[in-house]
Image (spheres, rainbow, N blue to C red):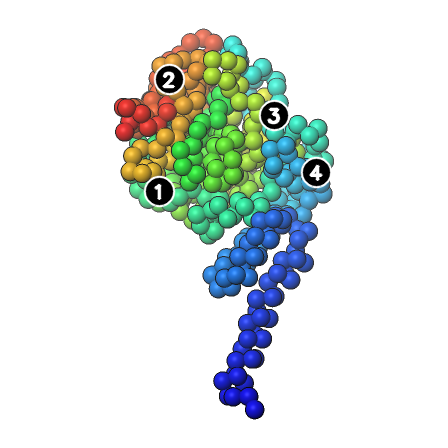
Amino acid sequence: MASRGSFYFVPLLLLLILLLASPPTAAASDSSKPGSGDAGNATAAAARLRPGKELLKYKRIRALLRKLNKPSLKTIKSPDGDIIDCVPSHLQPAFDHPKLKGQKILRPKNYNFTVTGSGSSRGGEVVVQAWHATGEACPEGTVPIRRTIEEDLLRASSLRRYGRKLVRRGARRDSTSSGHEHAVGYVNSEQYYGAKASVNVWSPRIGDPSEFSLSQIWVISGSFGNDLNTIEAGWQVSPELYGDSNPRFFTYWTTDAYQETGCYNHNCRGFVQTTNKVAIGAAITPESVYNGRQFDITLMLWKDPKHGHWWLELGSGLVVGYWPSYLFTHLARHANMVQFGGEVVNTRPSGSHTATQMGSGHFPSEGFDRAAYFRNLQVVDWDNNLIPASSLKLLADHPGCYDIQGGSNSYWGSYFYYGGPGRNVKCP
């Protein structure tokens, strides 16, 4: 006759087996959905081995993938490993204002193509991304969106804040207390309704996987407290976010100083994409070569005076999409600052300054073909005119690590070189 201990032990053992067996069944039924694959099998295996915390994380990852990845009409596998989903426009995370379809976009009055400098990309070229090498394109009526996969989420330091910058409480553009360091040119003496510039593209070395290096335009309004509104666009290298060291076209926005609102790219509701030609978050190619050919991209952000939305243009005339006006508080009216330049995260690995590079990884004193640059710096005024960014101020938080030097001429207009190697003898 079985003892009382055995009587209770057998049902409990059966119950535990059933609990452990159920998650893999669900994962198998989900294998054809976006984001599934080897990483999903690895996560499911971890969940079987440690059913408590790992199982909860696995469920959260699957739920977030379902939220981020939308059904697509076509899938393109990029040579760099990215998966590009051609998602019907109305299914993208922030589809909004279908009544805008077919209406004329009101660019700045004196809008024209930016003159390109010697050795840089030619005017009129379409910005090329790695996935374009396949020769495939997304159909009309769809937008290309880089698929989020489980490896992306497993790298994230926080699932809740995936696709967002770290909270930077009390951080100003000239503060390094949050571990963010800058070399920027900025204007803040007027009301601004947009900005435009060209920046050359590099692949700076990242010293620690949790750090990033970016070059971008910031359109800013509000104080540098909890009500800060920003719109940001440029190129970025971020191993944690993208899983590699490729420079990628990116966007960002926030209305509360990076706390709870806003995100990168399409990682939340916000930016509405209108083109089927480029994918936000996808790699840019080619890159600039030290002592060789320079490749730059032109970015323009501006506020449509008719609808009040903030539009983004990449390259020569390619409108990417817009941030709806209702997202913002201060930027619903205008910006009070525009910044151009570089930013890195310095986590001080091993107690010393990071070796993460900014721009080309070389100081601005090395000049053209060697240092990173911004050129043809312009802003949009109250009357929707593109004008030179006058009274430009230059700021480098730590000039021994990353510096900036500016100038002006008839060919490049207002410009500056910026960047640096990070840790070196002048930056311990």
Q: Which amino acid does label 1 sit on?
A: Arg
User: Which amino acid type corresponds to the residue marked 3 in the rendered image?
Assistant: Val
Split into 4 quadrants, where in the image is the N terminus?
bottom right
Structural crowding at the residue carrying mark 1, measured as other residues with C-alpha within 10 Å and reported as few (<14), some (14–19) or many (≥20): some
Position in image of residue 315 (x %, y %):
57, 23
At 48% from the left and 37% from the top, the residue drawn is 239
Q: For the residue carrying disc 2, how many other residues have a C-alpha within 10 Å: few (<14), some (14-19), or many (20+)?
A: many
Residues at marks 1 and 3 touching, judged by CB atoms closer than 8 Å? no
Q: Which of marks 2 and 1 is nearer the N terminus?
A: 1
Residue 24, given in percent of the width and then of the height, sits at 61, 61
Regarding mark 4 in the picture, which secondary structure is present there?
A: loop
For label 1, the residue is 168
Spatial CA distance of label 3 from label 2 is 26 Å
* Residue denoted by label 2: 364
Residue drawn 61% across the image and 19% down it: 125
**Which of 142/59 is in front?**
59
Report the amino acid beneath label 2: Pro
For marks 1 and 3 on the same chain, the one whose residue lies earlier in the sequence: 3
Disc number for residue 128: 3
Q: Distance between the residues labelled 1 and 3?
A: 33 Å
The CA distance from mark 3 to mark 4 is 21 Å
Q: Residue furthest front?
A: 1
Q: Do the residues labelled 2 and 1 touch (CB within 8 Å)?
A: no
Measuring 68% from the left and 44% from the top, which residue is drawn there?
A: 72
Q: Is residue 161 left or right of residue 1?
A: left
Q: Which of marks 1 and 3 is in front?
A: 3
Nearer-N-terminus badge (1/4): 4
